[in-house]
Image: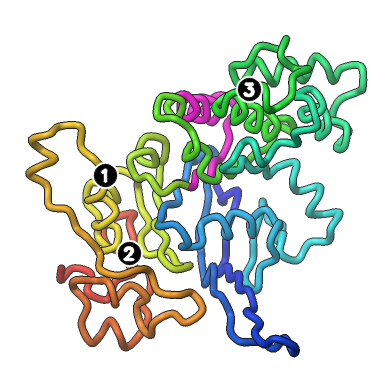
Amino acid sequence: MPPILELRDIRTHFPVRGGLFRRRAAGVVKAVDGVTLTLARGEVLGLVGESGCGKSTLARTIMQLVPATGGGVILEGRNLARSTAAETAAARRDLQMVFQDPYASLNPRKTVFATLAEPLAVHRLCPPAGIPARVAGLMTLVGLAPRFMQKYPHEFSGGQRQRIAIARALALNPKIIIADEPVSALDVSIQAQILNLLAGLVRRMSLSLLFIAHDLSVVKHISDRVAVMYLGKIVELGPAAAVIERPAHPYTRALVSAIPVPDPVAERARRRIVLPGDPPSPVNPPPGCAFHPRCPHADARCRAAPPRLQPASPGREAACIRLGEI
C-alpha cells in the first residue's frame, strides 16, 4: 500500500537578519535541509537526534505551523505545502500533534471539557447534545475519570496533562499523530505509562505515529523504524532493532553508546564514544559531510562532498562515504 505520509526533500530555512538600522540578510539557518521520509499506515516511526538537529522544526513543517522553504508534504496524495488555508484546516482532521510541554500546550483559562469540546465544535463532528458524552469517552480512553472534566490544567499533574493533550489530539479521529518528545518533561515512571498508552492507542485505533525523541532507549521500546537526524539531514534509517543494536553511521554509534545499561558490570565494560566539540552551526555548516568535524573516522573524502543515503543492509540506509570500511 502507498504510504499515508510522504516527505519529499523537505527544506525549512530561516533568514538571519543583521544590522542596527537597516535589517539586511546576513545568512540562512538551514534547520531542515533535504529530508525525505515515508510513514506507512499503522507504523510507528521514531525520529531521534541531538537537541537543535531540526526534529521539532520538521514536525511543525509537517503540521504546516512553519512554512516549508521547499519540498512537499504528501498526505494521502495531497501536497499540504501547496494547499490553501481551507484545505490545510480540513487536513488537520487527519493529522494531529502532541507537544513536548503539556502545560504550555493547554489553555490555562479553559477547563478540560472546553479544551476537548472545541475541536468537536469547530469541525462539526458531533451535535451539541452529544459533546459531553464524547468528551467523557475521550477522557476514559486516555485513562482519566470523566468527573474531572470541569477542572483546569493547573489542577492536574504533568502526566495527567499530557493525557489531556493526547485526548485532544484524538478528538478528531485522526489517522496520524505526531508526538514531539511527549515524555521528556515527565518522571521516569510516568514516561512508561504514557509510552504504553500511545502504543495501545496505535494498535487499538490503527494510528500512524511519528514519535520524536532524543532517548534511543525510549524510541526502541515503541518504534517499528528509526530515523536518525543530524544538522537537518537524515543520516541513518531502518528497523528499530537493527539501527540500535547494529548502528552503521558513526553518529548513531555515539548515540547508542550513551544509552545507560542497568547492569553495573556490563556498564563498566562498555566503551563510551564521546564526540569532540559541539554540533556545527546550521547557519554555516561545514563542507562535505556535516558530521566530519566530530567524526573519528573522517578522511579527505568526507570533506569533499556531502554523502547520500545508501543501503547499509537489507531495509536499512546510512549516509556515510566510508560505509562498510569502518
Marks 3 and 1, Cα distance to the nearest angstrom?
A: 31 Å
Span of residues in magenta: 193-212
Marks 3 and 2, Cα distance to the nearest angstrom?
A: 43 Å
The kind of residue on which mark 2 rests is Ala
Residue 156: mark in rendering: 3
Which numbered disc flags the more N-terminal residue, 3 or 1? 3
**Is 13 covered by the magenta stretch?**
no
Rendered-image quadrant of the C terminus = bottom left
Q: Residue furthest right?
A: 128
Badge 3 density bin: few <14, some 14–19, many ≥20, Cα 10 Å:
some
Q: Is residue 113 left or right of residue 3?
A: right
Q: Secondary structure at mark 3?
A: loop
Residue at mark 2: 318
The kind of residue on which mark 3 rests is Phe
The answer to which of 54 and 159 lies nearer the viewer is 159
Residue 98: mark in rendering: none
Which numbered disc flags the more N-terminal residue, 3 or 2? 3
